[in-house]
Image (cartoon, rainbow, N blue to C red):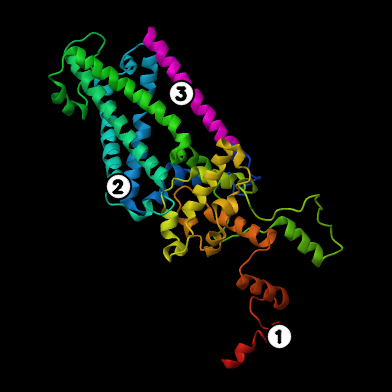
Amino acid sequence: MGIDNIIFGVVLLAALAFFGYNLGAIIQLIRGGKPYRPAAPLGFRFRSMLRYAFGQQKMFDRPIVGLLHFFVYAGFIIINLEMLEIVIDGLTGAHRIFLSFLSPSTYSVFISIFEVLAVLVIVSCVIFLVRRNVLKIPRFHSPEMTRWPKLDANIILVTEIALMLAFLLMNASDRLLQLKGVSGYHPTGDFLVSHMLMPMLSSFSADQLVFLERFSWWGHIIGVLAFLNYIPYSKHLHIFLAFPNTYYISDKPKGYFPSIPEITAEVKYMLNPEGPEPPISEEPPLFGARDVYDLTWKNLLDAFTCTECGRCTSECPANLTGKRLSPRKIMMDTRDRLEALRFRPDAESHTLFPNYITAEEVLACNTCMACVEVCPVGINPLDIILKIRRHMVTDEGKAPSEWNLMFGNIENNGAPWQFSPDDRAQWTALV
């Protein structure tokens, strides 16, 4: 073991430790939410995770984009199985350690498959860059998509392209070194894609090829570790959080709105005074949500899982008719508020409502659940909207005049309309 291996080990441990620290901080933020107890059976939860996180079922509602996303997802994950070999080589000083128990022909087939996937990742990322920056697909240029969200997506796409190119250049220069008989470079046979890059490097000397191979090797591993530590600061945290988020998808029917336990207890006692009295707390309960920690931890997990893809906003009838509501912004604002609490503790008074999310936004929602239905990873912006709306109406007593009229009619007439209950059926006389 040489100095290179020691340096590699230190870099690897530091990168993993920093990632663990950041991931732990995010988990701590999520755990600060109110309790959430999913009633769905385990079988339903595992099926949801397999369908939506592993199988990406909802991504294929838009087949071409779904296929490209699958190439990036599957290709990046599978190609980085080779990271295991790189890590072992880096720690032990070996070179292509898997050759010690695989034949050169078998090894060549596996690496060739990885190279084909690398090309698919590159092609897909280029198409995504064109869609965002040249074609300017509208959902990527909504008002909430400010400079950072746009830059974040481009950084990830360019990084993935660079990592795949480093992988291909590493293999091409490695194979040329094998053919030159340079010590330490064991024969593998040609790889399918990098073989086509070899003529571009044929004029390089052995020393230049060694430099290129080592540069690409280190570039690939450092790039992957840097990517790993960038993820907690990026929307691409969904790479990890999509799995628990889809595992905790509710099995309730679409459109199900849970009642407020404290109000339910009061109503039951009013209807049956001889029953158990509702519990009395020292502080009046908060029926809705004013800040992030009035939400459940599942709401907060939703916020960190959001990919900012904009499918929810592109399907939202309120947004399509010019209202200020954007379900994507609801999730981005919730995450921004959580990150403000992490990095700027002095932001304690700058609450989610009304400082991030406004009354105009939540009142524009017609609760159609289009945003919930279309989300690829099981996010529920509507739940946050309803909790903020409940806070406005129930805790602050602030509701539009039309709503107050409806509330009065329900209280006095048993229906939203301004008729006496005795007159409600008179329309039948006109039939």
Furthest-front residue in view?
346
Mark 1 / mark 3, whichever is N-terminal: 3
Magenta highlight: main SS: helix
Q: Residue 120: x and y, percent?
A: 27, 38
Label 2 sits on residue:
133
Q: Nearer the viewer, residue 94 or 417?
A: 417
Is residue 22 covered in magenta?
Answer: yes
Q: State which mark lies toward you, 1 or 3.
A: 3
Q: Tell me which segment is drawn in magenta.
A: 1-28
Q: Which one is in front in this view, the residue at disc 1 or the one at disc 2? A: 2
User: Is there a contact, CB below 8 Å, between mark 2 and mark 3?
Assistant: no
Q: Of all residues shown, which one is farthest toward the bottom?
A: 430
The numbered disc on residue 243 is none
Q: Which mark is residue 15?
A: 3
For the point 36% across and 20% down, the residue is 85
Q: Position of residue 74 (x, y in %)?
A: 36, 37
Marker disc for residue 422: 1
Q: Are marks 1 and 3 in contact (CB under 8 Å)?
A: no
* Type of amino acid under label 1: Asp
The C terminus lies in which quarter of the figure? bottom right
> Label 3 crowding class (10 Å Cα cut-off): few <14, some 14-19, many 20+?
some
Q: Amino acid at mark 3?
A: Ala
